[in-house]
Image (cartoon, rainbow, N blue to C red):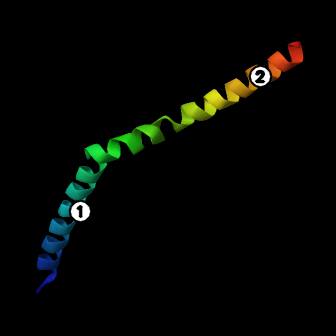
Amino acid sequence: MDINDLRGLSTVFLMISFIGLCLWAYSRKRKKSFDEAANLPFAERDKELNRRTVEKEEQND
């Protein structure tokens, strides 16, 4: 086995790994968790806005 065989095997291994990662990332059963993760920054902002609104209402009372 020479260096060219090793390069070929590593290329095949990396290609299979990449395809597996793509299939995992775009599978239907992962969609829900990825959608939740994508909306996390907005959820934190909503909580902060809600907290500020409640504080303003309490000050006005």
Q: Residue at x 17, y 66 (%)?
A: 11
Q: Is residue 39 left or right of residue 1?
A: right
- Say which of 61 and 23 sits in front: 61
Chain-order first, disc 2 or disc 1: 1
As helix, strand or loop, the secondary structure at mark 1 comes to helix
Residue 3 is labelled as none
Q: Residues within 10 Å of mark 1 (few under 14, many from 20)?
A: few
Circle 1 sits on which residue?
A: 17
Q: Amino acid at mark 2?
A: Val
Q: Kindly tell me whether residue 26 is visible in this rendering.
A: no
Q: Kindly tell me whether residue 7 is visible in this rendering.
A: yes
37 is higher (above) or lower (below) than 3: above
As helix, strand or loop, the secondary structure at mark 2 comes to helix
Q: Quadrant of residue 2?
A: bottom left
51 is higher (above) or lower (below) than 22: above
Q: Quadrant of residue 50?
A: top right
Q: CA distance from mark 2 to mark 1?
A: 50 Å
Circle 2 sits on which residue?
A: 54
Q: Residue furthest top?
A: 60
Q: Amino acid at mark 1?
A: Ser
Quarter placement of the C terminus: top right
Residue 22, how many percent across, how many down? 25, 51
- Say which of 58 and 9 sits in front: 58
